[in-house]
Amino acid sequence: MELNRRQPDWRERVRLWGAELEQAVLTSHRRRLHDSILGCVFPDGRADTLCINALLPLLHTSGYNCERAWIEWPPGNHPEDIEAARRVLGLVGSSRNFEVQGILDVIRRSSPHATQA
């Protein structure tokens, strides 16, 4: 509700933002999403989670090329032990979404309750 109050046209802004995504520098485009489009309503981690789990997939189904952004985007909120797993794997620097998604998939597949594909 706060987003709708602060940015009533946020949906259209997301569409325009998505149209520029393929050519954009991700760091500045990310900041624009957080500040100008989402109106600083969400903390950065939550805004990143919203982006990779909802906005980018919805934009993709609407025909926008979001693959590079989804892969490289900061992963948003994730379990703390993911950072420990990154260190064990020798991954350094800022986390990227594809790393976290891969680690989560390995954890999911190795769970005794995982369904067999």
Image (cartoon, rainbow, N blue to C red):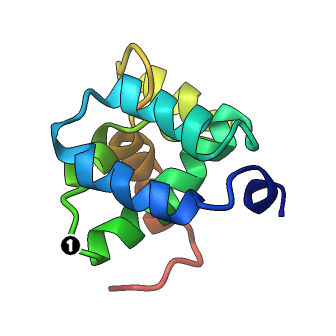
Kindly identify which residue carries mark 1: 63
Identified by mark 1, the residue type is Gly
For residue 78, say whether it is visible. no
Residue 111 to residue 115: above or below: above
Q: Residue at x 40, y 42 (%)?
A: 97
Q: Nearer the viewer, residue 108 or 7?
A: 7
Is label 1 in a helix, a strand or a loop?
Answer: loop
For residue 57, say whether it is visible. yes
Q: Nearer the viewer, residue 83 or 30?
A: 30
Q: Residue at x 38, y 33 (%)?
A: 29
Quarter of the image holding residue 9?
Answer: bottom right
Q: Quadrant of the N terminus?
A: bottom right
Q: Residue at x 35, y 55 (%)?
A: 16
**Crowding at mark 1 (Cα within 10 Å: few <14, some 14-19, many 20+):** few
> Where's residue 72, x and y in %?
31, 37
Residue 70 to residue 95: above or below: below
> Where's residue 13, x and y in %?
47, 54
Single out the residue that lies furthest toward the front: 9
Q: Is residue 85 left or right of residue 27?
A: right
Q: Quadrant of the C terminus?
A: bottom left
Single out the residue that lies furthest toward the top: 93
> Where's residue 79, x and y in %?
66, 43
Quarter of the image holding residue 23?
Answer: top left
Q: Is residue 108 left or right of residue 65?
A: right
Q: Residue at x 47, y 85 (%)?
A: 115
